[in-house]
Amino acid sequence: RRMNAAACPALLLRKVRPLGAAAVDVLVQGDRIAAVGAGLPVPPGAAVEEGGGALLLPGLVEGHTHLDKTLWGLPWYVNEVGTRLVDRIDNERAFRHASGHDAAAQSLALARAFLANGTMRIRTHVDIDTQAGLKHLEGVLRTRDAMAPWQQIQTVAFPQSGLLARPGTAELLDAALAAGADVLGGLDPCAIDGDPVCSLDLLFGIAARHGKPLDIHLHEPGAMGAFSLGLILERTEALGLQGRVAISHGFCLGDLPPAECNALLARMAALGVVLVTSAPPSRSVPPLLACRAAGVTVLGGNDGIRDTWTPYGTPDMLERAMLIGLRYNLRRDDEIDIALDCVTRAAALGCGFADHGLLPGSRADLVLVDAQSVAHAVVARPRRRLVVAGGAIVARDGVLRPGLPGELPSSSPG
């Protein structure tokens, strides 16, 4: 079922507009962009796709989701969960245990839907806890391997139920990294673990032993979150982890006075600590433009999609870019370009996905849409006319081609 990208015939896209620029041809050979220019010759045996002036986007990037949790394609889940974070954590763990929730099947269904919509790079957090052990990770690793010719999936070993509250979790995180998880996750060292110094020392120690980067969920508000963020930055510097740490959510940065927020942003920029946002409408959010002005890389993600936490979300990163634009009141075309950047260039940079883009030598992950400009594509979210992943055409008009892994149809409404 796998495709050898090197064996793919050459592909020439004629008259496409990279990010809205003048129309050019794009030649793909193997899994790479070989040339970009007007009037490129057709190599012998190459397939030719007429773009007709359509907008060409680089492959979309999902910087923060939870493939293992999703109920995508399953019957509607009636959400009656309490409002506290711990309510949602406990409910989800109990539901998944009682229902026999299949992380392999569900992560594959959502990964396929992402691919049909032009997302070829995904960072997914995967729950590791003392009840499920490594079960969910094993399922997502199967999806990662199945989709590897077309999608690059990073897995984050994530202690959703806390690190200190459930003895044995640290050992499971250690085992998860040894089993192939790419990144170590963390969660609210004050609000969930109750001992931020111990929690972060333990977390950073595990990451250092395995030489893995960190991605820490920080939901904590205001002064509490700022305190935790300060501790994270101290350890990042002390352990030489510059460029290896991400803060997901970072709601506290939206609560703080500008002077305090700017001081933290300056430290984050100096240490290469990136910020991941889903731009939720119900919480304070980090100031996107101030973050970028300070030199902090900001990337976007859906967070959960159709799970026991939330009924919302779709595997469409153009929609997430639109929601980022709405949340941050981005109205000018050049501002909406920033929203797309959060799910393309900045997301690839922040997650460490190499060779992303539309230049020769980049991996040939390409999305063709009928739109006049980047801003138009973000706002209108047109059906993906053509999706090329690793040099191979994998979808047309939002429908995956036959032969890719998984049995659920890509048109499933979730």
Image: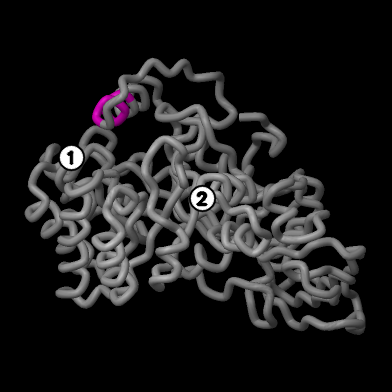
> Based on the displayed image, in which of its 4 quarters is residue 91 positioned?
top left
Give residue 253's position: percent from left, percent from top: 31, 54
Amino acid type, label 1 = Ile
* Magenta part of the chain: 86-91
The crowding category of the residue bearing disc 2, from other C-alpha atoms within 10 Å (few below 14, some 14 to 19, many at least 20), is some
**Residue at 20% from the left image edge and 41% from the top image edge:** 162
Residue 278 can be seen in this image: yes
| Total numbered labels | 2
Label 2: state its secondary structure.
loop
Seen in the image, is 154 located left or right of residue 188? Answer: right
Seen in the image, is 216 located left or right of residue 130? Answer: right
Amino acid type, label 2 = Tyr
Q: Which residue is mark 1?
A: 192
**Residue at 43% from the left image edge and 18% from the top image edge:** 79
Q: Which residue is mark 2?
A: 328
Seen in the image, is 89 located left or right of residue 300? Answer: left
Label 1: state its secondary structure.
loop
Residue 151 can be seen in this image: no
